Image: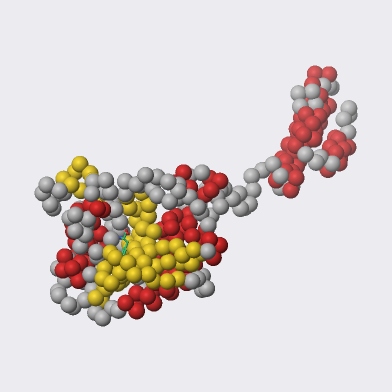
Amino acid sequence: MRWDFPSVHKTAEEESKSIADDKALEAFRVKYLGKKGVVADMYASFPTLAPDEKAAVGKGANDLKNFLTQLIEEKKQSLLSQPSAKKNAIDVTIPGAAHPVGHKHILTQTVNEITAIFEQLGFVIHESPEIESEFNNFTALNIPVDHPSRDAFDTFYLDTPDPSNKGRKLLLRSHTSPGQIRIMKDFKPPMAVVIPGRVYRPDAVDASHSYMFHQLEGLLVDENVKFSDLKGLLTVFCQKFFGKDIKMRFRPHFFPFTEPSAEVDIYWKNRNAWLEILGCGMVNPKVFEAVGYPKNKYTGLAFGLGVERMAMLKYGINDIRLFYENDVRFLKQF
Ligand code: DAH
């Protein structure tokens, strides 16, 4: 017999034990089962064999081929399950890489912070449209026809006629206070709401003015609401927003829609100055009259604060334009 089959089996099996990667396995396959491999050699020798040898070599070669095929398959599987092979495979159990998708704008964060405080105090959040009627923005708030803020230079009027008031034009609200009128027309007291949103004034843009900025309106209406409620509420709010040892003061002021009215100032240590942060007061009975509430039944408190102003004071931002330029070097800091 030209081949010692049992010893070829044994040698191949021994050799296969040292196969450590796909490349070595492929070399092993080529050596034994390739076109010029050991098994092919055996078949190639057929024509030279004596008839009685042919049967034995044929069987031996076939058995060897089956044995090697199985050996190679098993080796392939065991290589796949080895850690070194896993290195190149996709491990679906690894947590996904954190991908930066940005974050909320500092103004959104500030509005959220302010509304969260008022929610804790029992207020609900409402939204009110940016396009308003002259009635809601001025008349119902007791702002007289000759008031400068109603002037075309101080308000953005649209070309769109007001469907509820023939001959008048709709406008971009100049403050969030018309939200008070809408809420009071839609709901009955008791009520406690805050209304955040954008407001528009045709101001020249500089470090402290913009043609668009954000306000937050507050309104609480019930029977027997007192000025002390307003003072207490806004004191608690300012302490929660700016910190417990904030110094604040209520300074008498005038607003047509509140009586009495005040402005609140916060003392800013590093600037050694009082800075105004909001307007407030007790709802003027004329406003209740405009929304059709019964005479002398309700009292209410109201306030309106500038969101940019609050953020500028809290975070030391000195130019309002930074909020709208969307320079990531600025935005990333908050
Ligand atoms: N609407 C006023 C403004 O834009 C702010 C304001 C003052 C709102 C007093 C109020 C208030 O609700 O009571 O200047």
Q: Name the colouring of the figure.
A: secondary structure
Instruction: Indicate left or right for 306 with 64 as reference.
Output: left
Q: Where ligand 1 lies, by image quadrant? A: bottom left
- At which x and y percent is residue 331? 52, 49
Instruction: Indicate left or right for 331 with 205 as reference.
Output: right
Residue drawn at (37%, 44%) of the image: 204
Task: Examine the rendered structure and indicate whether residue 172 appears above or below residue 5.
Answer: below
Instruction: Indicate left or right for 123 with 144 as reference.
Output: right
Camera sees residue 64: no
> Residue reaching furthest left?
166
Camera sees residue 155: yes
Q: Quadrant of residue 138?
A: bottom left
- At which x and y percent is residue 251? 37, 70
Q: Pick the residue in front: 114 or 146.
A: 146
Instruction: Indicate left or right for 204 with 10 as reference.
Output: left
> Residue reaching furthest top?
47
> Residue reaching furthest bottom?
224
Residue drawn at (21%, 59%) of the image: 143
